[in-house]
Image (spheres, rainbow, N blue to C red):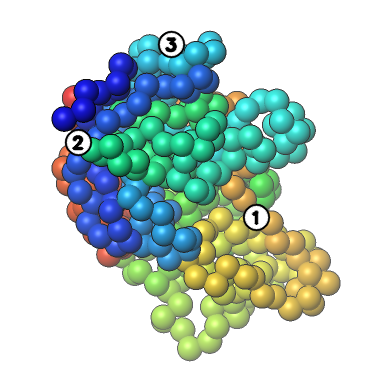
Amino acid sequence: MSTPQPGVITCMAAVAWGAGEALVMEEVEVSPPQPLEIRIKVVCTSLCRSDLTAWQSLASPPIFPRIFGHEAAGVVESVGEGVSEFREGDHVLTLFTGECMTCRHCTSGKSNICQVLGLERRGVMHSDQGTRFTVKGRPIYHYCAVSSFSEYTVVHSGCAVKVSLNAPLEKICLLSCGVAAGLGAAWKVADIAGGSIVVIFGLGTVGLAVAQGAKLRGASQIIGVDTNPEKSEKAKIFGVTDFINPNDYDEPIQQVIKRITSGGADYSFECIGDTGMVTAALQSCCDGWGVTITLGVPKVKPEVTAHYGLFLTGRTLRGSLFGGWKPKSDLPLLVDMYLKEEIQIDEFITHNLSFEEINRAFDLMGEGKCLRCVIHMPK
């Protein structure tokens, strides 16, 4: 048996060995942080639908074995060479898309798409294209350069943000992806005006966060579209005024929406990850100024098809990654808003599970029986 290298931590992680296969609790070795990296003791992590999609390998090439998870909060255990903004004991949120602060995009004021620490799709670290996990000497791939389904993980220091010690980690972990993405889409990307009509396709966590953002901006009508009738009551908590189940109608849903809004919504949001729904969302908007924001990650058919006439008449289609937030710069403001009870987070949490129950979280999300499952690591 080999002797662990200095600074290596041995802990438990939920490893996915193949597409759609149940995660297996494995003893993994976690390398010490390299230059400009930090190692985090994960306190809690929640399951995001993009984890489920990547695990099923429906939207991207399969990369296995792998440790999923990216929506997480924890405590800095150690820091690598050159790290000055973090120290041991700091509370942090992980970031699936980072912020280097120096690239063209980071300094532009126009974008949150960091050219250095943007979305990592190959299962490795940004810095050296290597991994920080092994099982019996075998490298284990990362997910979004976070991999929070492990008791300890290593991330680039630009892919974490320090948060208040007063903020409950088991709640604010949702801000590291889904809730923040929805709020940002409503506020920063669409910039919803008071009195507007809003339609939201898909009432998962992201869609309901959009609804919350629209409500706080004073939208007059917020229409939620979902095929799960159980979403109706929950949606009201976040501001949805009208719930529509497409299965209840014999006509295309976009026609229903145009009829009940006297010509279409001011803003529509596609939060499902279905490019066919992007077209329906565009058609649900009004002529002249209707704006459609797409947030979902497509599972199949990534190409969007739309008649040019939709744009000729003044509609706009916009994409949104993480709601347009600059993660390190902006997330502390959302944490403060939560602490001041200005935004809702607790209401998104439908299940609290132990780390050993992580496969149940995948089942619940796959069956459409949860919004967010918060997974609590052993103390």
Q: Which mark is residue 27?
A: 2
Mark 3 belongs to which amino acid?
Arg
Dot 3 falls on a residue whose secondary structure is loop
Determine which quarter of the picture holds residue 164.
top left
| Nearest-to-viewer mark from 3 and 1 | 3
Residue 319 marker: 1
Give the mark nearer the N terminus: 3 vs 1: 3
Q: CA distance from mark 3 to mark 2?
A: 26 Å
Is residue 371 or residue 68 the one in the foreground? 68
Residue 137 percent coordinates (x, y): 28, 37
Vertical relation: 50 (above or below) 181 = below
Circle 1: is it few (<14), some (14-19), or many (20+) Cα within 10 Å?
Answer: some
Q: Which residue is mark 3?
A: 87
Which residue reaches farthest front?
A: 1
Lower sequence index among marks 2 and 1: 2
Which amino acid is tagged 1?
Gly
